[in-house]
Structures are given as structure tokens and as C-alpha cells.
């Protein structure tokens, strides 16, 4: 029985450029489908070839979009498709207005796209919620600088559309705001004029990541059986701070010749990838470091990568949550993470993981020291990995997270019902 349609609206959604946001949307959609709802993903054509798709049984509908800035080159448009582009899609807006039997709209982006969801929901008199996946109140200045590089100095002719769509009121008018990190939730409550804000962490498919084939993975990627393997999974992007990890690894490998490092994830900043490859060449690390951009989210090799690792490292400059930590935990891998953002409340230092400060002048030295500590102490690796696994199983299974999301939807519906008005 169809209990109503739930419309998820992310900025983009393609299988070959996968990240934490895509995982969250897909997993909660699967849970909502099991509960009798009709979840659908409506998004832009960014990085996509097909207008209509189906991923793990969830329909994906895509619409043409543009970036309303004068003088954008094809390379700049491609960069905005990959990350942070403030797009405009009137066809998507029209599609939302045609939706029938909508229970709730769930926006996974802000700016003009968030305004599109806001306005469609107001016109149709339906509730809408907003999830903050990439951070808005908790983003370092350097990261914001990276995001705006493609449009720097370009005239933005799309501002009137943003005004008409209420782009600056998306969070204020939302029936509920969802934050994946505690620190962002606290800042959102302080900044917004209402208290309709909830902290809702991401979840994990614990069964999927519980078992893997580390030997097959090492054989596939020519990693010696006795090598100490460090794995990083995330977008090849300055936010993920792989350069700091490379600097730490160079020092670590000098004393540990059998060490290997894998950087796994889609390339969202090609210029940053070039910086990484230049460092690898300059420091003669080509035989011990490999960048693997092509492991899809549905690939069994992705699960095997966690199980093949002796240590998992997330070195991000900022991180609203860090879903890959949950995946590493489910594989019982020891985790080293940045003491930033949502990671600070997710990981407990020296219990479920080890912390370093990515902004400290000696950040690479801190990280190298932690790698040395893990390498020298197999019992510590086992203790951290098992504690992380217990934490993931106890608190972060998707069924548990989606149950909390359902409660938030009900709060949003109550608020929308109490404030219903005929105009947007």
C-alpha cells in the first residue's frame, strides 16, 4: 500500500560519483520503501547522461539545469557540477509542482535548489525539511574559497530567481532542519530564529560491511600480503585533506618500508589530484601509494578495501559527519580521524579511534606518529576496531536512524499543518 510519496531533492545523484550524501539518501529511501512509502529522487542532470534511472530499486528523475553566471567555461561548469554549484533548474521546479500524493519534500541542498523545493512545497501546501550534509554553519574559510573559485569575477544574472524562490529563507521557513553533526546543530539553533532543528546522524548498513575478502582485494591491486596497508576513502578533494595524509605517510614509510597507502574515491577537484600526484612523484612514493578513483558504491571491492586495511584514516579539514568511519568500524578496522566537525562527537579518542588536529602546524607529524603507534601495537588495532564495531552496531544501523527521521517528518507535518497559508 502506497502511504504517500516522499520526494528527495539533492543537487546531483549519479552512481559513478558517489559520496556520503548519496549513501544517506539511498539508504533512507530504501527504508522508507520498506515502510510502504513511495520515495523518489528528483535532481539535476549534473554529471548524468540519463534523464530517468533506478538505483537499488529507487527511481531517480533528472532535469536540465544551468549556472546563471556570465562567462563560465566548460571546465568551470564541470567543476560546479562536481562540487558546490549553485544551479538553477526551472524544469525541476515544474516537475515538483506536478507531483501528486506528496507526503513531504526533503531538500538535500540550499541556495537556489533549496529555494525551488521551498517554493514548490509552499504552493502545494506540503511540508518540507532540509538536511545539511556538507555543512553551512561549520565550514572553514579555506573550503568556502575553494567552492567559489569557478565563479570568482563572474556576473551572476540568476539573483532575481534566487529572490523569487526565497533561496535565503530556505532554513528559516523549513518545517524542520536536520543536521548530521552535533556541532552544526548547535550552531544552527544559535543562528536561526526558530528551534525546529534536530541532530540526526548518518547510519550504516552494518551487515553489508561486516564481511569482506581482504586477500582478493590485495591480490587485485598488487598489495603484498605482509604490507601494512593504510586506506582512505573519500572524494579526491582538498576538503578531504589527502595531501596531509601523504605528508604523514612519507615520514611513516621512511621507517616502515613495507607500508602502502590507498586513496579511494571520485575526483571532484582535478587540480588537487594533480597536486597529490606531483607530491607522490617528488617523494618517490609511486611504488607505495595508489589513487583509485573508480570503485563504485555498489562494488564488492569497496567493502573488501576496508577489510584489507590495517588502518583507516580520515584526514578531513572539516567533516559534518564522516559516514566512512561507520563503514570502517563495521569492518572492525582501527580509525584515525581529524578532530573536527561531527567527527568530534562520533569518535571517542583512544576508545573508538585516535584523533589528530589537521590545522596544527605539525599535523603531518601528529598523523605519522599515530600511524607508527598502530603499526607497533596489533592489540591496540584490535581493541579500537572492535570498540568501533560495537558502537556502530549499537547506535547507527539504518533502521534505527530512519525511525528517528520518521519522527522528524511527523514534527514537520505538525508544524506545516499549524502554519498553513494560501501563498508562498
Image: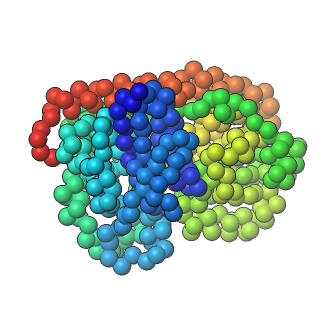
Establish if 102 lies above or below 86: above
Q: Position of residue 43 (x, y in %)?
A: 40, 53
Q: Position of residue 205 (x, y in %)?
A: 59, 32
> What is the residue that sits farthest to the front in this orientation?
1
Q: Position of residue 424 (x, y in %)?
A: 15, 46
Horizontally, is 173 left or right of 302 in the view? left
311 or 12: nearer the viewer: 12
Residue 186 visible in this rendered orientation of the protein: no
Residue 280 visible in this rendered orientation of the protein: yes
Q: Quadrant of residue 331?
A: top right
75 or 376: nearer the viewer: 75
Q: Quadrant of residue 334?
A: top right
How many numbered discs?
0
237 or 363: nearer the viewer: 237
Q: Say which quadrant the N terminus sits in.
A: top left
Residue at 28% x, 49% y: name it.
98
Establish if 143 lies above or below 3: below
Horizontally, is 197 left or right of 296 in the view? left
Residue at 52% x, 29% y: name it.
398
Residue at 74% x, 68% y: name it.
281
Q: Position of residue 60 (x, y in %)?
A: 46, 49
116 or 109: nearer the viewer: 116
Horizontally, is 321 left or right of 288 in the view? left
Residue at 12% x, 45% y: name it.
423
Amino acid at each position: 500500500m502506497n502511504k504517500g510519496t516522499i520526494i528527495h531533492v539533492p543537487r546531483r545523484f549519479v552512481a559513478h560519483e558517489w559520496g556520503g550524501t548519496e549513501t544517506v539518501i539511498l539508504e533512507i529511501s530504501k527504508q522508507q520503501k520498506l515502510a510502504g512509502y513511495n520515495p523518489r529522487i528528483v535532481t539535476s542532470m549534473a554529471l548524468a547522461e540519463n534523464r530517468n534511472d533506478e538505483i537499488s530499486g529507487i527511481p531517480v528523475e533528472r532535469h536540465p539545469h544551468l549556472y546563471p553566471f556570465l562567462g563560465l567555461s566548460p571546465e568551470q561548469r564541470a567543476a560546479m557540477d562536481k562540487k558546490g554549484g549553485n544551479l538553477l533548474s526551472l524544469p525541476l521546479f515544474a516537475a515538483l509542482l506536478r507531483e501528486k500524493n506528496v507526503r513531504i519534500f526533503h531538500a538535500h541542498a540550499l541556495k537556489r535548489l533549496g529555494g525551488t523545493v521551498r517554493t514548490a512545497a509552499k504552493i502545494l501546501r506540503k511540508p518540507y525539511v532540509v538536511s545539511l550534509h556538507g555543512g553551512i554553519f561549520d565550514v572553514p574559510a579555506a573550503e568556502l574559497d575553494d567552492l567559489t573559485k569557478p565563479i570568482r569575477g563572474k556576473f551572476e544574472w540568476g539573483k532575481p530567481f534566487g529572490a523569487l524562490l526565497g533561496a535565503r529563507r530556505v532554513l528559516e521557513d523549513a518545517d524542520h532542519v536536520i543536521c548530521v553533526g552535533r556541532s552544526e546543530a548547535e550552531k544552527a539553533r544559535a543562528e536561526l530564529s526558530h528551534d525546529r532543528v534536530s541532530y540526526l546522524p548518518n547510519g550504516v548498513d552494518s551487515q553489508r560491511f561486516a564481511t569482506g575478502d581482504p586477500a582478493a582485494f590485495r591480490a587485485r591491486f598488487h598489495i603484498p600480503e605482509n604490507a601494512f596497508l593504510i586506506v582512505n576513502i573519500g572524494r579526491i578533494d582538498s576538503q578531504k585533506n589527502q595531501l596531509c595524509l601523504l605528508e604523514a605517510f612519507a615520514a611513516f614509510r621512511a621507517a616502515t618500508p613495507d607500508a602502502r597507502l590507498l586513496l579511494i574515491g571520485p575526483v571532484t577537484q582535478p587540480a588537487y589530484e594533480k597536486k597529490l600526484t606531483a607530491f607522490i612523484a617528488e617523494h618517490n612514493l609511486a611504488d607505495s601509494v595508489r589513487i583509485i578513483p573508480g570503485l563504485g558504491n555498489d562494488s564488492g571491492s569497496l567493502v573488501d578495501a576496508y577489510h584489507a586495511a590495517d588502518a583507516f584514516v580520515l584526514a578531513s579539514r572539516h567533516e559534518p559527519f564522516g559516514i566512512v568511519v561507520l563503514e570502517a568500524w563495521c569492518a572492525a578496522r582501527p580509525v584515525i580521524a581529524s578532530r573536527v566537525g561531527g567527527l568530534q562527537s562520533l569518535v571517542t579518542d583512544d576508545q573508538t579511534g585516535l584523533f589528530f588536529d589537521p590545522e596544527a602546524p605539525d599535523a603531518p607529524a601528529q598523523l605519522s606518529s599515530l600511524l607508527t603507534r598502530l603499526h607497533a601495537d596489533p592489540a591496540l588495532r584490535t581493541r579500537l576496531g572492535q570498540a568501533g564495531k560495537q558502537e556502530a552496531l549499537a547506535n547507527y544501523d539504518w533502521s534505527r536512524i530512519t525511525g528517528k527521521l520518521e519522527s522528524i517528518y511527523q514534527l514537520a507535518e505538525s508544524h506545516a499543518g499549524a502554519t498553513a497559508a494560501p501563498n508562498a
